Image (spheres, rainbow, N blue to C red):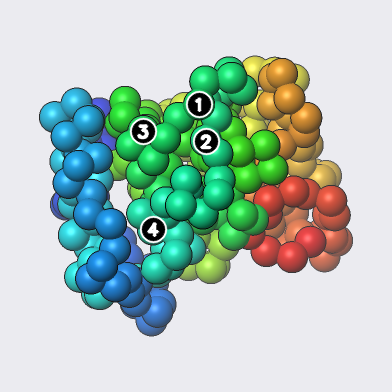
Amino acid sequence: MPWTVDQLTGYVESGLDADLARWFPDKERVGVPASTRPVAPFLTRLPPAAATAPAAFDRRVRSGAMARFFDIEDWSYAFEFEENGEAILDSDYETELSDDDVWSLGCDGGGNYYVVLTSGRVAVWFHEEQVIEAETRYDNLDVFLWSLVRYGAVRAGVLDLSDVEDDFRSLGQPGAQVPSGGHPGEFATSKGQPAGPPTRVSQPGGPESRPCLFYRISIDSYRRSSGRRVNGCKGLPWGS
């Protein structure tokens, strides 16, 4: 049966290490300096149940033993937006947030930051507009990291897209699926066998924005199966 959001509760603590060991045994390890901003003050702003996963992930980041399965760097983890001259706008493009309102996990490879919000949800800070995207969010950090690990495994060729597509559908996370015709949950591919280039994602109320996670998997699969290049995709973590 496909996974549900509730079933992934506790993934960071009980499942992440095994997945990284299985699919990324030779990946470079994450390393951040001891002076990296502590996560404890941010955790106090989260609902108690939502603080468990960020605390567990922080311990792994600082341990020096976790595989670097996305851009977790000494400059991207616990990134301080204000200190670096960056603003943080909420998704209404008006409300100004501060470093107290978000916790940076790392980058997507295109200049955008994955951040935990004080609600416990995970969102993307889109660098071109300095805004927290509304339509590419995840319910919590457990679901986000489960998704990102499998995205990386599919791209690395160690996991078949068809093995996880039903799980992505079941989880229904906007940040991992491609809205097609404005209906979240509809995919641009069928069982990982694209018939043509996947369509791009448009953000309501704003210009064409960064593709969702599943779109990235789909477009990468299309490139491999067709041998064709799909250009002009903003924010992709690899060259077009």
Q: Position of residue 55 (x, y in %)?
A: 18, 48
Label 3 or label 1, whichever comes before in sequence order: 1
Q: Quadrant of residue 64?
A: bottom left
Element assignment for label 3: helix
Q: Position of residue 179 (x, y in %)?
A: 66, 26
Q: Which residue is mark 2?
A: 88
Q: Are marks 4 and 3 in contact (CB under 8 Å)?
A: no
Inter-mark Cα distance, 2 to 1: 6 Å
Q: Are marks 3 and 1 in contact (CB under 8 Å)?
A: no
Residue 217 seen by the camera? no
Q: Which residue is mark 1?
A: 96
**4 vs 2, front mark:** 2
Label 4 or label 3, whichever comes before in sequence order: 4
Question: Going 53% across and 68% down the picture, which residue do you hit?
Answer: 156
Label 2 or label 1, whichever comes before in sequence order: 2
Q: Are marks 2 and 1 in contact (CB under 8 Å)?
A: yes
> Mark 1: few, some, or many residues within 10 Å (few <14, many ≥20)?
few
Q: Which residue is mark 3?
A: 101
Q: Which residue is mark 4?
A: 77
Q: Which mark is residue 119?
A: none
Inter-mark Cα distance, 4 to 3: 15 Å
**4 vs 3, front mark:** 3
Q: Type of residue at label 3?
A: Asp
114 left or right, relative to 22:
right
